[in-house]
Image (tube, coloured by chain):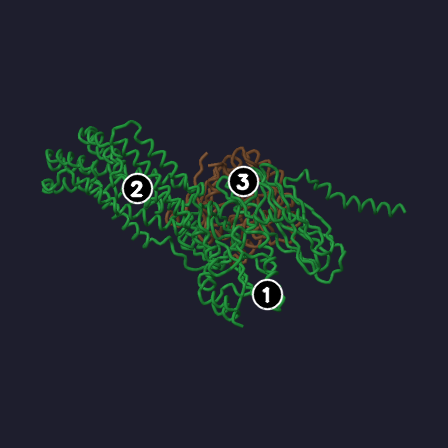
Chain colours: A green, B brown
Amino acid sequence: MRLVSFIVVTLLALIAWPAAAQAPGQRHIAIDLVAESDRPAAGSEVTLAFVSRPQAGWHGYWRNPGDAGVETQAAWTLPAGVTAGPIVYPVPHRLLIAGLMNYVYEGPFTQFVTLTVPAGLAAGTALPIAVKLDYLVCTNEICVPESASLATTLTVGDGAVTAERRAEFDGWRRAIPKPLGSPATFAVDGDRFRLAVPFPAAAAAKDVYFFPITDGVIDYAAPQSVTRDGDLLMIETKAKPGRHPTLEGVLHTGDGQGFSLTAAPGAVAAPAPAMAWNAALIAFAGAVLGGLILNVMPCVFPILSLKALSLAKANAAEGKAEAIAYTLGVVLVCVALGGVLLALRAGGASVGWAFQLQDPRVILVLLLLVTGIAFNLAGLFELAAPGMANRMAASGRGGAFMTGALAAFVATPCTGPFMGAALGAALVLPWWGALAVFAGLGLGLALPFLLIAFIPALRRRLPKPGAWMETMRRILSVPMFLTALALAWVLGKQAGVDGMTIGLAAATLLAAGLWWTGLRQAKGRALAWLPGTVAAVIALAAVGAITRAPPAQAGVAASGAEPFSEARLAELRAAGRPVFAYFTADWCVTCKVNEKAVIETAAVRDALAKGEVAVLVGDWTDGDPVLGRFISAHNRAGVPLYLWYTNGRPKPEVLPQLLTQAMLTGRAGS
Amino acid sequence: MRLAFATIALATALAVPAAAEQVTGTPAGNFKLTDMSGRTVELAQFKGKTVVLEWNNPGCPFVQKHYNSGNMQKTQAAARAQGAVWLTINSGAPGKQGYMTGPEAQAFVAKEKATPTNYLLDPRGVVGKGYGAKTTPQMFIIDAKGTLVYQGGIDDKPTANTADIATARNHVTAALDEMKAGKPVSVAESRPYGCSVKYPES
């Protein structure tokens, strides 16, 4: 008896000891093991969650910890036949400490594991689940490896999930990367790594970062540069030596959301230097021409005339030196203005404004700018302070360089028309292209002065300032109005009739305000700019009212499709209709290609209509968990998913991810 | 204190990216550091001998795994017995975990009964960054000709659990044995694991 009690006490001590050693209070990450269903059905899967809360100042590690750290290890103790899948991690954060990159979680995070319950277990069978997690938890200074022994007991049942538990899991699921569904490509060229990810131009992305799962492909601490070119998102960073047959990772696209992707080696174009050079050359030439035309603007031409006269008095060598100094002054001021604008653009991009022509809000701002410029050229109101500019230029104080700089700077308001065009270009061009445009504008502005200094014969041919300049200005307003018209059309395409109407209303309001300003200017009233400024502010506020017209809905309406819901699917099936259900997302290029080339074609639409096939569309753009569950019930992790329900068959046919028209027309006709 | 980081020949300086990592199979970058007794030690002075570099931080649990179990001392002794030079390097910055002065390093070596050829101090992290050392422990092996033949972790079980040492492949011992037998190093690179090197904030 004494021996038995000794053994029992020893056993109890052995069991109790690890528990005491791992009291939750001593750990730096508190972890709870939660099952989505406490009563999973036999022959099904149930999701388990490790709900983790690091202490303030401590962080846990992602699957790939980065330059240092280790991955979490799970050692399971499971009933016979029950298996656990790998740990699925939410999108991590970046933490750069003293030049070393760590992929971590600095706040609460939840990992998932899928548990498979074998078929044939009787309801009521207890399933004791135990796991020992070994993980690393660190502050910026120190690291502690910890272990957590977690256990729960599930009971074989009907797989029911309580509403409360479902809501919790759906919340955690939003942080899990969604499968992108389109294959990416990567290339290593010397020490440069490039990744091309199919990602529709219309899908939003900010603070983009590629978290590699495959180790040794890229230098984690090196900055990543992101460019978007149509339906491709490109990431360039520093490569590590070595070749890799494949690359896995997670693409962060803002707000803790991400996409898991697999990339194969292939050709990834460097951000197309040849094409970009052409484009930049054209933009540069256009800017030089624009700068040249600027010279005949009423407020600039007098400066030129005065300087030309002073040049005529100077000797040739002095004149040339003065002309070069003047040119430098003009170009530098123009480039500096461009630099300020690029800094503003960078600031905007960091808070998530993508200056792309695909964004209707950008189009609206450009529409208002161009409208204002056009009305200025037409003479509705004035921008210049020509008297001041003339005084500055004529005095010649501070040398030719300063005169040039002042001429460009003081004349900026009345160079508005072309500055405006350059501004618009600078918002959408790469930074060096934008600077080239501004430099070209300056060069064009200084060009006549340079020519006069170097070819004295031209001085006599210089036209005299006069009324012809005003006529020239009025004529130039016509192309500007046409530009505004084109922008209004683009706005209409992107934001629909409502968006275009808002845009035109804003432009009308702006014009009325500027007209009022012009009237006050003509009468020489004080505060002439007040009405114009107020109108401009109100007009710009319309940006908030502009939203993108959902293009999917337009397509849906055309093909007679309805939004997907399981209830609607059951209803249509009960009515004996064949159903084609497809699941798509705005960020899925493969989906969009299939829709354009197959689903939304006339042939398919007609065939579906003729076969009386109901079409249901599930939009998974925002990762709706209800749709997500339906998709994963068909053994797919994400979109695209194409299901064909034939009358009388209980299960749908899962069509391939790359559709052909024949696949749909054939089934609709049978 | 003089700290210098220079490549063995100017010609290779162009091939080795500055302040980046060393490329396996190419000449390892030379360096000079002050040792725990205040003397200057240069890598080039060991030419003709195999050199093992070990990045160390006595406060790191992963380093403790290999010292408390005696695994690091055993690996050191085996290397020294083969005639190899073993340099333990500490790139921890003053005020950070694991930073040691010369006398503290001497005390550490004595307490752990470690037998490195020398213990070198790199408080500015110049040599650590030049070698791309990211974790503690992290190991490098340079052959008699000065070529870097191994860089990575001490073994293939990236855990803090002492029990894993018995079943792990010790990459350093394996490489040294292969080199002694005149064979090429079969695992020339592995992923190092452990705590991050506590470099100064730059």
Q: Are marks 1 and 3 on the same chain?
A: no
In the image, A459 versus B115, the foreground residue is: A459
Q: Residue at x 73, y 51 (%)?
A: A153
- For the image, the number of numbered tags is 3
Residue A293 on image: x %, y %: 21, 43
Question: What kind of residue is marked 1?
Answer: Pro
Q: Which residue is mark 2?
A: A420
In the image, B26 versus B178, the foreground residue is: B26
Seen as rendered, the residue at the extreme top is A526
Subunit under mark 3: B
Question: What kind of residue is marked 2?
Answer: Gly
Q: Which residue is mark 1?
A: A652
Q: Residue at x 48, y 47 (%)?
A: A209
Question: What kind of residue is marked 3?
Answer: Tyr
Horizontal side, residue A156 vs residue B145: left or right: right
Mark 1 falls on what kind of element? Answer: loop
For disc 1, the neighbor class at 10 Å (few under 14, some 14 to 19, many from 20) is some
For disc 2, the neighbor class at 10 Å (few under 14, some 14 to 19, many from 20) is some
Q: Are marks 2 and 1 on the same chain?
A: yes
Seen as rendered, the residue at the extreme bottom is A670
Mark 3 falls on what kind of element? Answer: strand
Residue B12 on image: x %, y %: 39, 49
For disc 3, the neighbor class at 10 Å (few under 14, some 14 to 19, many from 20) is many
Label located before the other in sequence (2 or 1): 2
Does the image show residue A365?
Answer: yes
